[in-house]
Amino acid sequence: MVDESARMPGRGAWIHPSAECIKKALQRKAFGRALRVQGVLDTVEITHQLENRLNG
């Protein structure tokens, strides 16, 4: 979930709102490391939200 206000409780991951940063983070599996989650994360929704923010 994207927390643009940075006020939600819990652990988060910072990322620049750019297509290149999103692509690199997904390739490097950086979200899982930043969030300390093992296994595969479903990043479809977060990618969609960030792309919508970039495009519109």
Image (spheres, helix red, strand yellow):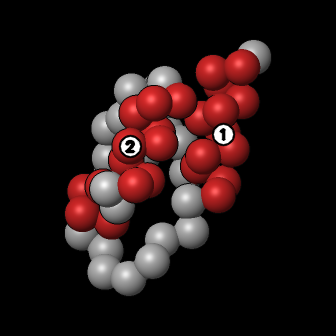
Task: Name the side, left or right, on which 38 lies relative to 2.
Answer: left
At which x and y percent is residue 53?
Answer: 65, 25
At which x and y percent is residue 33?
Answer: 24, 63
SS state under label 1: helix
Mark 1 nearby-residue class (10 Å; few <14, some 14–19, many ≥20): few
From the image, tell me which residue sits under label 2: 24
User: Nearest the camera: 52 or 27?
Assistant: 27
Which residue type does callout 2 highlight? Lys
User: Nearest the camera: 29 or 31?
Assistant: 29
Which residue type does callout 1 highlight? Gln
Q: Residue at x 49, y 24 (%)?
A: 18
Mark 2 nearby-residue class (10 Å; few <14, some 14–19, many ≥20): few
Q: Are marks 2 and 1 in contact (CB under 8 Å)?
A: no
The furthest residue to the top: 56
Q: Residue at x 66, y 39 (%)?
A: 49
Q: Residue at x 34, y 61 (%)?
A: 29
Q: Residue at x 66, y 54 (%)?
A: 45
Task: Please state which of the two labelled residues, at mark 2 or mark 1, is closer to the viewer.
Answer: 2
From the image, tell me which residue sits under label 1: 49
User: Nearest the camera: 27 or 7?
Assistant: 27
